[in-house]
Image (cartoon, coloured by chain):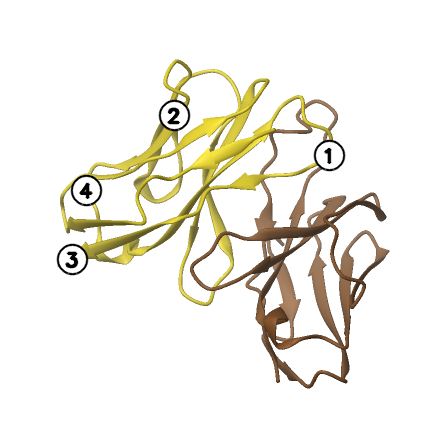
Chain colours: A yellow, B brown
Amino acid sequence: AQSVAQPEDQVNVAEGNPLTVKCTYSVSGNPYLFWYVQYPNRGLQFLLKYITGDNLVKGSYGFEAEFNKSQTSFHLKKPSALVSDSALYFCAVRDAKAAGNKLTFGGGTRVLVKP
Amino acid sequence: DTEVTQTPKHLVMGMTNKKSLKCEQHMGHRAMYWYKQKAKKPPELMFVYSYEKLSINESVPSRFSPECPNSSLLNLHLHALQPEDSALYLCASRQEDMGLAGGNEQFFGPGTRLTVL
């Protein structure tokens, strides 16, 4: 079985400050990890993924994430948040050994960046 | 063309109506998905098609009927829905690749906002 936890329902940060959105996962095999962002009344937009290789992954719009196998975490980070980063963020995992094409999503974290 | 399109954007239907949602992509992706999303919740997987064949049905009620007429199109036929079926319905597609079958990301459409009266 595969699962994802996003422990914070909401993260508040001032514009220009660093932003971190936490994600931990559980899989039986090797994980494929993804971050998506969703703006109001829109679909999910892919930000970045970890498949293999370097633990630090860089993605769209200045976001990056660090894969930590020992802590089973994949936290999303941005050095300097913008008001336009305010949105709903989802972490997702797929077990490399799992049959089918199923992604398991975390519960989502709402990010509010204040001017 | 790197997008997934969905029509209509909004749909209001009565419980006795029959309607269809449409999804289209021209990225050559051979895996296509339907998700249901309630407000402020993660998407819930409904169906997966791989190479135009239904590969996953997440025990979805029969009032939802998927169809994949060709590799670019995915439909979701709706009949006798309940008010609790009101939600945002998202379509997604993904490149199937033997070498990176698990690693390719899904591309999502903007969704259809469905209201069942």
Nearer to us of marks 3 and 2 is 2
Q: Which mark is residue A100?
A: 1
Q: Is B69 left or right of A50, judged from the image as shown?
A: right
User: Which residue is identified by label 4?
Assistant: A80
Q: What secondary structure is marked by label 3? A: strand
Q: What secondary structure is marked by label 2? A: strand
Nearer to us of marks 1 and 4 is 1
Chain letter belonging to callout 3: A
User: How many C-alpha atoms fall within 10 Å of the one at disc 3: few (<14), some, or many (≥20)?
Assistant: some
Tag 1: amino acid: Gly
Tag 3: amino acid: Lys
What residue do we see at 22% from left, 52% from top?
Answer: A82
Q: What secondary structure is marked by label 4? A: loop
Q: Which mark is residue A73?
A: 2
User: Which residue is identified by label 3?
Assistant: A114
Q: CA distance from mark 3 to mark 1?
A: 41 Å
